[in-house]
Image (cartoon, rainbow, N blue to C red):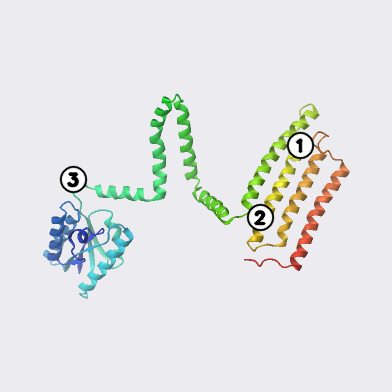
Amino acid sequence: MLLVLCVDLDDDLGRKTGIPTPVIGADEVTEAAVALATADPEDSDVNVLFQGVNVYDELAAGGESVEVAAVTGVDGSDVRANRAVGQEVDRVLAELSTGEEVSAVVITDGAQDESVLPVIRSRMPIDGMRRVVVRQAQDLESLYYTIKQVLADPETRGTILVPLGVLLLIYPLVVVANLFNIAGAAVLGILSGILGLYSLFRGLGLEDTVDGAAASVRNVLYTGRVTLVTYVVALALIVVGGVQGMETVEVVRGVRGAGITAGVALAAFVHGFVQWLAVAGVTSSLGQITDEYLAGRFRWRYLNAPFYVLSIAVVLYAVSGFFLPAAPGVTSLELSDLAMALAAGTLTAVLSTLAFAVAESQLPSADPT
């Protein structure tokens, strides 16, 4: 048996005429079409219903076992509409119950209604599909639906509309800039830079990375983690250390009275920078240890971090000082001093590791989570 199925996904028939659906039978569908045409002559679903009756008449005249029915969805939600159509199709099949295998010819008025085809296909085979549109507006609804879907998708909307918006703003912003005696080239440069950065951002797929970083920052702010403060302080200390390192390079250059080699310049920079770096490392590690303790995840071994930072800083400070001449702010070390510093750094790291390993084995700590 062949079922001619007229699909009205947004339920214009039910909303505008009050006729209960599904509508089964040629006479009933014809009456529904007339009622809808009377209520809204411009509704394209009128054509769908009449087309369904027309197809029914053609097939019946050829001796085909055929029935026609109209099913509707709901307005406003494609998912809910598809489910509603599926339920009405089930009711139609239950009322037919002829014992014959039923296949469908689906009649729609555009691409939006055709989104329900998988729902119908899951219940019976589809032998054909016919789209009914006004001849003067061929493919107009499909174009409208495609544009609507593109604009409804946040990802596609951002990809297309943001660059388009920037391009459309170029001319008016240049006009405004000229009114204030600002060079138009500067405006073009800024806008092209923004567009270029946006293209790189989208092309490299950094959306998830940025979203994850923003979520992490929000989590840190809302949960009151100490690391937020200590990381900011550590960053400030690193910046200060970088400036101090450059000043140390200039001091050494002034003492030498001539050009210095790249190795000496590197040693001078490290000598001035490493002290601040050590303080930054200790600060950030103490913040992390505090957060772990407050979260109940504290381990004694975590206390190794600041001692490791200090050990590394002592070694770098001593090695860099060994290669530098005596100068203001520079601690020039002899070979014996270097040996003592290396030994002190090594012993500090080893002893801290052993001490906290023993503490962890003897003293209670938080259970792992």
Label 2 crowd bin: few (<14), some (14–19), many (20+), radius 10 Å: many
The residue most toward the top is: 181
Q: In the rendered view, tell whether residue 232 sits above or below residue 86.
A: above
Q: Amino acid at mark 2?
A: Gln
3D distance between C-alphas at marks 1 and 2: 31 Å
Mark 3 or mark 1, which is nearer the start of the sequence? 3
CB within 8 Å, label 1 to label 3: no
Q: Quadrant of the N terminus?
A: bottom left
Between the C-alphas of marks 3 and 2, the distance is 70 Å
Which residue is rendered at x = 13% and y = 67% of the image?
Answer: 63
The nearer-to-camera label among 3 and 2 is 2
Q: Which residue is mark 3?
A: 136
Residue 260 in view (yes/no): no
Please name whichever residue, 271 or 53, is drawn nearer the observer in this view of the structure: 271
Q: Looking at the picture, which amino acid does disc 1 mark?
A: Ala
Relative placement, left or right, of 75 versus 309 is: left
Q: Residue 167: x, y in percent? A: 40, 36
Where disc 1 sits, the SS reads helix
Q: CA distance from mark 1 to mark 3?
A: 81 Å
| Circle number at residue 268 | 1
Q: Residue furthest right?
A: 336
Q: Which residue is mark 2?
A: 288
Indicate the quadrant where residue 286 lies.
Answer: bottom right
Residue 269, image x, y percentages: 73, 37
